[in-house]
Image (tube, rainbow, N blue to C red):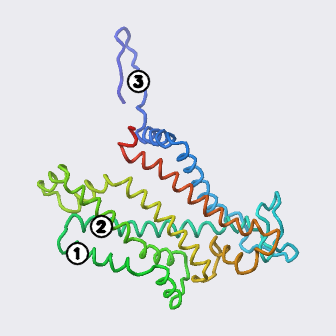
Amino acid sequence: MSQIVDAGTTELQQLPPPEGKDAGAFRTFMRALMRSRTGFIGFLVFVGMVLVCLIGPLFTPDNLPTDTSLIYGPASLTHPFGYDSEGRDVFIQLIDGGRAVILVGFLAALLSTVIAVVFGALAAYLGGRVDAIIVAATDIVLTVPSIILLAVLAAFYRVGSAITLAIILGVLGWPGLLRAVRAQVFSLRQREYIEAARLLDLGTTRIVIREILPNMASFILMNFVIGMTNAIYAMAGLYLLGLAPMQGGNWGIMINFAWTRGAIFFDGSLGYILGPVLAICILQLSLVTMARSFEEILNPRLRHN
């Protein structure tokens, strides 16, 4: 601990402890995040929905009680979205079903982004035969309609868990981003600092990870958000069309049951129909607006403007 001797006395005075770097970095991050009001609101909404969907099921009953006298019952203050076709509270189902949706969206986007970034960067940086093989594989996957392939997979293989569904969606969702990453890396590899790194023989892994990818952080983040929204929409579409097993509970299954069990013919079922749709829309909107603030933080040119 640094100490100061006062000129006129023999007393020792301690310097105040320096401010922690972690606290300063967190404050800087929060100030940058709050520069965009819509982005900060989106961040708060997204964090709130994630916390509710992750922690909320711990306080809800494992098996919701059914009451046939409340089938498609209207909304009220204690039950803001009414009841479903079995007389169960819709709001509790929204809380319980959000965890699977967020998990599938996050894992599918993470998998597709990792595949696209790694192979797209390698294809553009190495070029030659590696580039030709990766581009050919990408073109082949792009020519296969995803919805038809998912329907075929659903006919022969039952998706029994959210993680399995996320892996399938992630494996099918990378080709478009890979081509975009490849184009970005083609542009960055001509920069002076990349040429200098190559002359210093820093190695392909170091140059790609330490020099090229950090300059694409905002681009990768935006495409991760897009991948997450696409995965959530694809998941909801699969359940709506009945191409995924109706096991457990999530917002896609709720939409399917509302459609197949004739909820549109009951006056009090509006909350049951619109509840999962609104939840998906609010989650997607919060993701997009939050990503705008993160893009400004990661992109110095946007931050200084």
How far from the left and from the top, in percent, is residue 166? Answer: 49, 74
- Which numbered disc covers residue 120? 2
Q: Which of marks 1 and 2 is nearer the N terminus?
A: 2
The image quadrant that residue 47 belongs to is bottom right
Identify the residue at horizontal 46%, vertical 84% (top origin). 149
Tell me the mark number nearer the camera, choosing from 3 and 2: 2
* Quarter of the rendering containing residue 85: bottom right
Q: Is mark 3 on a helix, strand or loop?
A: strand
**For the residues marked 1 and 3, what is the alpha-carbon distance in whole angstroms?**
65 Å
Q: What residue type is labelled 1?
A: Ala
Earlier-in-chain disc, 3 versus 2: 3
Marks 3 and 2, how far apart in space? 55 Å
Left/right placement of residue 211 relative to residue 68 reads left
Count of numbered circles in the view = 3
Q: Which of 211 and 256 is in front in this view?
A: 256
Question: Label 3 crowding class (10 Å Cα cut-off): few <14, some 14-19, many 20+?
Answer: few
Mark 2 neighbour class, 10 Å CA radius: few under 14, some 14 to 19, many 20 or more: many
Height in image: 58 above or below 86?
Answer: above
Q: Is mark 1 on a helix, strand or loop?
A: helix
| Secondary structure of the residue carrying numbered label 2 | helix
Say whether marks 1 and 2 touch (CB < 8 Å): no
Kindly identify the residue that appears in the image at 42 percent across and 41 percent down: 25
Residue 132, which numbered label?
1
Residue furthest top as drawn: 8
* Nearest to the observer: residue 8 or residue 213: 213
Q: Mark 3 points at which residue?
A: 14
Q: Nearer the viewer, mark 1 or mark 3?
A: 1
Residue 152 at x, y percent in the picture: 49, 88
Residue placed furthest toward the left: 199
The percent position of residue 127, horizontal first and vertical second, equals 19, 68
Residue 291 placement (x, y as % from top left): 48, 53
